[in-house]
Amino acid sequence: MAINKNHEFEDLNGIKCAIVERNVSVDRVTFLKNLLQYNGYTVVVEVNAIPAKTTEGVTENETSQVPSLYTIGVADVTFNVINAVFGRLLRTPDGHTVTLAYWQQKESVARDDVPYFSDNNC
């Protein structure tokens, strides 16, 4: 059980993992998986169960069209997203430090030369 919501962990596919994000799309899984593996973490992805209320009265063909959501975690249970991003512990493949905007995919390049408290970020 987690001490707080910022550091959750659980078994994903039989492996004890620190949860990175829940209910994410395939594109987000691909982005995070590549980034975290580049930084040396073992990434585990699990498909979330489709909620029963969304599948009531839906045919089997329509159920296959419902987009799947995923939970992504890392095998290192000491990993904490907030500490990793704001502690400047993660690097991008091009050598920059991962910023919050890069982590949230608001920027395609990590602007680690601009401080968090800059006027440009307000």
Image (cartoon, helix red, strand yellow):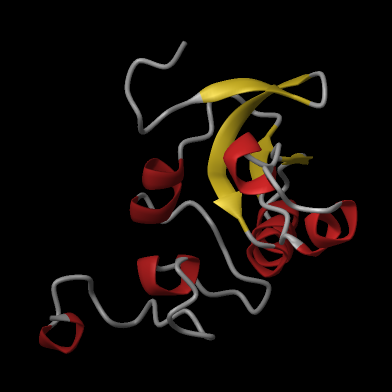
Q: Residue 91 at what x, y percent from top left?
A: 57, 63
Residue at (43, 80) in percent of width and height: 106
Residue at (52, 85) in percent of width and height: 109
The quarter holding residue 67 reads bottom right
- Using the image, determine if residue 6 lies above or below residue 108: above
Q: Nearer the viewer, residue 102 or 64?
A: 64
Q: How many labels sit on residues? A: 0
The quarter holding residue 122 reads bottom left
Residue at (53, 34) in percent of width and height: 79
Q: Is residue 104 shown left or right of residue 37?
A: left
Kindly give the residue lying farthest to the front in the view shown: 57
Q: Residue 49 at what x, y percent from top left?
A: 71, 37
Q: Residue 68 at what x, y percent from top left?
A: 73, 54
Q: Is residue 64 shown left or right of residue 40?
A: right
Kindly give the residue lying farthest to the top in the view shown: 1
Q: Is residue 16 shown left or right of residue 21?
A: right
Residue at (65, 42) in percent of width and height: 71
Kindly give the residue lying farthest to the right in the view shown: 61
The quarter holding residue 101 reads bottom left
Q: Residue 15 at what x, y percent from top left?
A: 78, 21
Q: Nearer the viewer, residue 112 or 14?
A: 14
